[in-house]
Amino acid sequence: MWKIICLTSKKIFDQVLQILHNPAEHFCRAFLCLMILFITGCNHWPDHSERVVSITDRYPETPEAVDQAYLKSLWDIGESRMAFVVNKGAEYCMPGQIKVVRSYLRRAKMEIDGSLFLDAQYSVATAMEQLDYVNRLMSSLSENSECLDSFVSFNGIDTPSEDFSHELAAALNCECDQISSSGEISVGFHKRLLMVYSAMENHPEIFLSIYSVDENAGNEITNYFSSKGINTRNIENKKGVLSPVLLSSDGLAFSVDIRKQIKKYRLREWRDSIDLESTIIRSPSSE
């Protein structure tokens, strides 16, 4: 469009030059000055293609790039995690915060069902961040809170939910590459291990069993958790024939258990509860 305007202006400029032999026509001189200013700017006008905003630049990640199975596992864990804090009195003492979490998880479920995976990823991440906030509030209330004391007296002593164990085990027993051909943990499976690590780091009651045809095949997994400070007594390598689930194509299977403590579970021990940080949304490279 600008090129057409420039060409038209230049034609008018040529016509003006033809009538400039009459110096009395001052308006032509004024018009000539304006045209010179106008035409000199034509070379600096950007081409229309330079002003187009790239959709790829605005949304660097495509829906196809989202790990859908991993996203669904995160949603399941978000549901279990919300149930956990609700059982500890979060909804009783801070109903508004739990309402926000329920809203984002419900939205994420609808987006996953509608294949809106980028939107669902955002909703799950926001729900996890909100759960982190609820966890911090519960930790600050655990020392001395009439609300939590009232909840405990009304509901009695509660025990940790075992829903986490089922969801964490389901995340590990995925139809994905677990160990690469070079014997290292694959990038996609690394994210799932990070999810379990986040739970084991803050909850000593979680125990992980690794089943394989060769007991040494699970050493890479054990070393991963050990390098991050997880007590190896909470990890067991077992023969695959005893596995409660089918072995994967890599010859591995996992089960997660919550073993009861002898002492009663008190709300003042909240800081030792499961704390799945929202960082599990990020890729391993961002650790």
Image: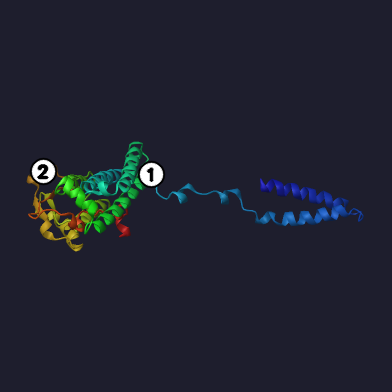
Q: Nearer the viewer, residue 199 or 270?
A: 270
Q: Nearer the viewer, mark 2 or mark 1?
A: 1
Check disc 1 and give the amino acid type. Answer: Asp
Q: Secondary structure at mark 1?
A: helix
Which residue corresponds to the image point at 65% horizontal and 56% vertical from the top-left? 44
The residue singled out by tag 2 in the image is 244
Which numbered disc, 2 or 1, marks the residue that appears first in the sequence?
1
Q: Residues within 10 Å of mark 2 (few under 14, many from 20)?
A: few
* Residue 119, numbered circle: 1
Q: Position of residue 219 (x, y in %)?
A: 14, 57
C-alpha distance separating marks 2 and 1: 35 Å
Identity of the amino acid at label 2?
Answer: Pro
* Residue 66 seen from this side: no
Q: In the image, residue 250 lies at what x, y percent?
A: 18, 48
One can see residue 156 in this view: yes
- Image side of residue 271 versus residue 216, left or right: right
Where does the image place residue 211, in percent across and percent down from the top left?
Answer: 11, 49
Residue 193, x across and y down, in percent: 22, 53
Q: Is residue 83 above or below residue 20?
A: above
